[in-house]
Amino acid sequence: VYSHRDTPQKRVSLGKLRGVFWIHIGSFALYNLLIGYLLVYRDNQLPEALFFFLAMGFHFLVNDHGLVQHHRQRYLMKGRWVLAAAVFVGWLIGHAIQLTDALISLLYAFVAGGLVLNVLKEELPEDRHSRFLPFAGGAAVCAGLLMFA
């Protein structure tokens, strides 16, 4: 049974959901922009570039899966395009603006920390049944890829 009093609450909660969606997309867009920026400053020899591509590709798949679960319709219509464009825009900015080596190292550290936090958030959630062995295996594979990247 619905009453007129239920309608404003629905609108407020939809507005909150929309706001949460854009906060998620904005923060991941900044994160993806940094990854795109750092692509310019890598030693892009074939084996290292391939390992980095694989590690980041798997990481983007995990992020994509989490965002689809939380914001399915909005993410599929708008969010994924914003995140894909952010990597490209970061790459363009990397060609246009050069930072000092110290700042580049700081950005690498930020991205590495973000990678760890995102993996922990997606792989060890409290509300779902988690399995340690797949998590440890995935972490070991990702660490190995990044060590060779």
Image (cartoon, rainbow, N blue to C red):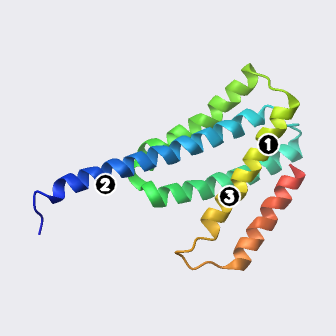
Q: Residue at x 48, y 56 (%)?
A: 68
Residue positioned 68% across, 58% down in the render: 117
Asked if residue 4 shows in the view, the reply is: yes
Question: Label 2 belongs to which residue?
Answer: 13
Q: Residue furthest top?
A: 96
In the rendered image of this protein, does residue 99 appear above or below residue 12?
above
Q: Percent position (x, y) of residue 147? A: 88, 54
Residue 144, above or below 79: below
- Cα distance in 3D space between marks 1 and 2: 37 Å
Give x and y (percent) for residue 48. 87, 46
Q: Give the residue type that dot 3 points to.
A: Leu
Disc 1 to disc 3, how far (Cα)?
A: 14 Å
Q: Say which label, 3 or 2, has the lower sequence index.
A: 2
Q: Secondary structure at mark 2?
A: helix
Q: Is residue 92 above or below residue 25?
A: above
Q: Is residue 116 left or right of residue 75?
A: right
Residue at (51, 55) in percent of width and height: 67
Task: Find out whether the residues at labels 3 and 2 contact each other: C-beta distance under 8 Å.
Answer: no
Give the SS element for disc 1.
Answer: helix
Label drawn at residue 48: none
Q: Give me the disc on residue 108.
A: 1
Quadrant in which the N terminus is drawn: bottom left
What residue sits right under mark 3 in the picture? 117
Seen in the image, is 58 located left or right of residue 102?
left
x, y percent for residue 129: 57, 80
